[in-house]
Amino acid sequence: MRDRPRARVLVVGGGINGVGTFRELALQGVDVVLVERGDYCQGASGASSHMIHGGIRYLENGEFRLVHESVVERNRLLRIAPHYVKPLQTTIPVFSTFSGILNAPLRFLTHRSGRPGERGAVLIKIGLSLYDLFSRQGGSVPRHRFLGRRKALAELPALRPDVKYTATYFDASVHDPERLTLDVLRDGLAAGAHARASNYVSAVGITGAGEGAAVRLRDGLTGEEFDFAAEVVVNTTGAWVDATNGALGAPTRFMGGTKGSHIVLDHPELLAACAGREIFFEHSDGRIVLIYPIGDRVLVGTTDIDAGEDLEPVCTDAEIEYFFDLIRHVFPSVRVGRESIVYTFSGVRPLPRHDDTAPGFVSRDYRIEKAALPGGAGQGMLSLVGGKWTTFRALSEHLADEVLALLGHGRSVGTGELPIGGGRGFPTDEEGVQAWLKAHTGPGIDAHRAEILL
């Protein structure tokens, strides 16, 4: 980048949305550079709940466009990234029949949670029926099913004995979001020498004016700074969007992120209680929370707290106690203590500023803010506000198309059905899996190791 300090597009931020936009532009043959100040996928992208989901709860917010896009992209990622995105059986334990019917329209209209009111079976049934309709396009995800108390406890015997029903449906998960992000990045780099990327490089200011305006970049390892010129600068720094714009001389107040924490537990009894599926439910405070297995560990999350100015959060003792409480809420006989914690992690969701709207009701949709590069001569600057893991490909496609329009550059490659990284040639059925394992098992690699490598 120092040797050739210019490109048509400079993308700042190496989370999944920045990396996805980089891939999109690189595949169109655009001269594009990506910089990330730390590790790729280190912010909210790496601190996610590891879910690729259609967003059933967004129905309550009236965000039908986002739900439709989410289920289409979920089904798509199951096809184009099957090496990392896997089907996830999800069960909702239900403890009442009619509760929440009156509160739901109020939440829908005002986007305020008000006094917590449990969502009962009727409301959940309506929601899942709508969700099934949205899920039909682009996939063969099974429809939801309801079980009564007796059958529910036969399937999940550790559930609270007063459970009335369970509702089970399918979403998807990504157990290794960092690895998938690197696959997306490598796809962009493999497009050719016109695509360059480096982490530990940050954008710290603007130098020059007019056609000579450039972004000042800093090497995070040496401290060296140099100027880099681009026709379009794309800010995909997530919760740091306002801070990045401020550093570039264009202060904004777009963001109002919320903190989400998780814990990961080594707890065989809780792992067995989940029976291989995600347990997705409403806690006593009205917050939607989850418990689900990742390998031989169990992930528990998540909180949703206004982050304020704290963009480098940690999981607090109060949040840990909240997670233990939510486990007791559905699995009262399972005892969990701090000795089972493998690690905790926290991130800040890149949500728009939301004033007095309750954090859980802030839109998870995204928008693109356009401006001119400060002091420049028509160079464009785009800021991404919002975005979520599930829709990263569609979002990146949209953002890249906005950039292409500014450049007067046409799209030549579609990514809707283009496999990502190791998704190319990945076996699609059990016969294919066994053939792959047989071909890759030999001296130094036993069957178990080959399965891990696959």
Image: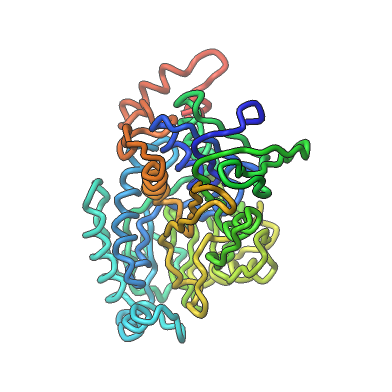
Rendering colour mode = rainbow
Q: Quadrant of residue 111?
A: bottom left
The front one of 108 and 279 is 108
Q: Is residue 83 visible?
A: yes
Q: Residue furthest top?
A: 443
Residue 450 location in percent, x, y?
A: 49, 25
Look at 66% across and 40% down and name the residue there.
201
Q: Quadrant of the N terminus?
A: top right
Residue 421 location in percent, x, y?
A: 44, 31
Look at 36% across and 39% down and name the residue there.
408
Q: Is residue 441 above or below residue 142?
A: above
Look at 61% across and 35% down and name the residue there.
198
- Side (left or right) of 317 relative to 239: right
Residue 52 location in percent, x, y?
A: 41, 51
Q: Quadrant of residue 224?
A: top right
The front one of 250 and 72 is 250
Q: Is residue 303 above or below residue 436?
A: below
Q: Is residue 86 visible?
A: no
Residue 21 location in percent, x, y?
A: 45, 42
Q: Is residue 211 above or below residue 423?
A: below
The front one of 377 and 134 is 377
